[in-house]
Amino acid sequence: MNRPIIALDFKNKTEIENFLAHFPQDEQLYVKVGMEIFYKEGPQIVTWLKSLGHDIFLDLKLHDIPNTVYSAMKNIAGLGVAMTNVHAAGGMEMMKAARKGLEEGSLSANRPRLIAVTQLTSTSETEMQHDQMIQTSLIENVVHYAQITEQSGLDGVVCSALEVKEIRAMTQADFICLTPGIRPLESAVGDQKRVVTPAKAKTIGSTYIVVGRPITQSKTPYQSYLKIKKEWNDE
Ligand SMILES: O=C(O)c1cc(=O)[nH]c(=O)n1[C@@H]1O[C@H](COP(=O)(O)O)[C@@H](O)[C@H]1O
């Protein structure tokens, strides 16, 4: 069964401990460590979650000059995470440097998967056109970012499931489309703009789904997780 990736967007380690206490101890999860918890607890949070047997997507969305991203990725590689990311807007040279850093810093030949954020799922087409002064449609922009990501040797992109079909038509079959902005029908949308249900993401062909608040803010997190997992796996 495919596991939804749970976004551990919590204030500190204690909150994560309380959250994980809702899950059976032997339930091996795929979790996302993002900026909020990483900047609070540091790399030790990754080491600790790994020691509990969980797989980790380290979501720090690097976007800087190629040399800085190369060096940062060398350090990230040493943490032994399953997947990490950059912003495609950083450009091809930056993305190639990110991959080189990961390869050189990896403890084994098995480097973490590297993916690039196209347009954040909290961005609408109108906002993209106004705020970033991009004069194409959002879908054209996202597909373009996916293509330069693949040409840079990365493994896939972060996008909304709404864009997966168009990306799949232009990239290799194994190209990862990781899709946040997942909302079961009964969940509040919050700050997300391009949202899709777990079932729809499955039909469209997302490789992974990332789910935060519908699980982390639930009164019954394990039940919510199982429900989303079922919806994501059912045909
Ligand atoms: O890279 C990401 O994970 C990401 C990219 C994106 O475009 N949109 C997006 O929501 N995310 C992350 O996915 C998670 C979504 O959380 P919820 O909106 O609570 O489900 C958050 O941790 C975001 O940082």
Image (cartoon, helix red, strand yellow):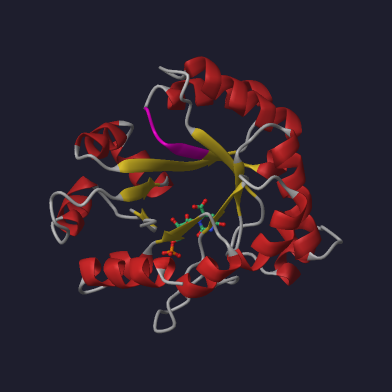
Instruction: Give the percent coordinates (x, y) of residue 105.
Output: 48, 17
Instruction: Give the percent coordinates (x, y) of residue 28.
Output: 24, 48
Q: In this view, does 73 lie above or below 207?
A: above
Residues 47 and 203: in front is 203
Q: In the picture provided, is 60 more to the left or to the right than 166?
A: left
Q: In this view, does 75 lie above or below 146?
A: above
Q: Say if the magenta span includes residue 212.
A: no
Q: Say if the magenta span includes residue 83.
A: yes
Q: Is residue 69 above or below residue 37?
A: above
* Outermost bottom residue: 186
Residue shown at 69% from the left, 63% from the top: 165
Q: Which stretch appears magenta?
A: 80-84
Residue shown at 40% from the left, 72% from the top: 231
Q: Which quadrant of the structure image shows residue 69?
A: top right
Instruction: Give the percent coordinates (x, y) of residue 53.
Output: 23, 39
Q: Is residue 145 above or below residue 222?
A: above
Q: Which quadrant of the structure image shows residue 58?
A: top left
Q: In the picture provided, is 141 more to the left or to the right than 196?
A: right
Residues 18 and 175: in front is 175
* Outermost right residue: 135
Secondary structure that dominates the magenta span: loop
Q: Which quadrant of the structure image shows residue 96?
A: top right
Residue shown at 60% from the left, 63% from the top: 160
Taking the image as drawn, is residue 11 in sight?
A: yes
Residue shown at 36% from the left, 41% from the top: 56
- Image quadrant where one finds the N terminus: bottom left
